[in-house]
Image (spheres, helix red, strand yellow):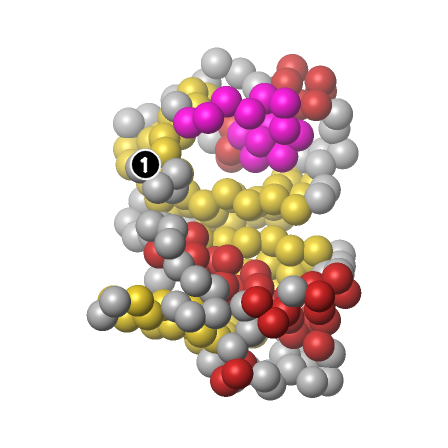
Amino acid sequence: MPIIQRTNLNENTILALWKISESKEELLTMLTGNLKDNGTNKHSSIHWLASRVLLQELYPTSAIELHKDEYNKPSLTINNQAFAVSITHSFEYAAIMICPSHPVALDIERIDERIMRVAHKFIRSDENFGESNPTLYNIIIWSAKETLYKYYGKKELDFKLHLRLHPFEYDTIPFVANGTIQKNGYILNLPVHVETFDGYVLTYSYGR
């Protein structure tokens, strides 16, 4: 399936979404020599393949290289120009966010009541403000914290200790939540955009 959403969030930042209807074999045939991935080769993963095909579809005539740093955070060059990139996937969706000027991060999560079983592992006592729809609320918190984690990019963050979502109203979606990363004197406050579609939550941040 072609790209189902491409959004120019500002003049520099692109967010694109792909719904995976292809088999692994079909996605493999769609890969071209335009893309070089210097990270871990995961051709056996349909999500890996879909995200790379999505990237190719965004820049079909460009030379693309993906890299991973020591923390496994991806970066990107397109025709030798450096870009920040974030990649996510969940079940039948893959998404990419790209920007040449500042870090970006995004996450997709399917809305599933099983999140309730593990909510105590990542919900802080000062984040209990989602009683009207606890499943959706917990998915939003989890996804938003995944986005903050990816934005930080250095791993070793405890979702309950180092990441916080400030109170928000989710009766009207989309909306923008406010999140804080705090660890060992490092503090960063970031807006986290929250959307829902087709039974999924999408969260992303591209700086202040």
Give the residues in magenta. 39-54
Residue drawn at x 35%, y 62% is 207
Q: Is residue 101 magenta?
A: no
Q: In the rendered view, tell whether residue 190 sits above or below residue 133.
A: above
Numbered-mark total: 1
Image coords of residue 25 (percent x, y): 71, 18
The answer to whether one can see residue 151 in this image is no
On the image, the x and y values in percent for residue 171 come to 67, 81
Residue 61 picture location, percent across and down: 46, 22
Q: Residue furthest left?
A: 185
With respect to residue 137, does 10 lie above or below?
A: above
Kindly identify which residue carries mark 1: 69
Residue 45 is a magenta residue: yes
Crowding at dot 1, Cα within 10 Å, few <14 / some 14-19 / many 20+, comes out as few
Amino acid residing under circle 1: Asp
Q: Quadrant of the N terminus?
A: top right
Provide the secondary structure element on which disc 1 rests: loop
Residue drawn at point x = 57 percent, y = 67 percent: 121
Image point (65%, 74%), residue name: 137
- Can I make out residue 105 in this image? yes
In the rendered structure, the answer to whether residue 8 lies left or right of residue 19 reads left
Residue at image point 52% right, 64% down: 144
- Quadrant of the image for the C terminus? bottom left
Q: Relative to the observer, which residue lies in front, 48 or 115?
A: 115
Residue toward you, 80 or 71: 71
On the image, the x and y values in percent for residue 90 come to 66, 46
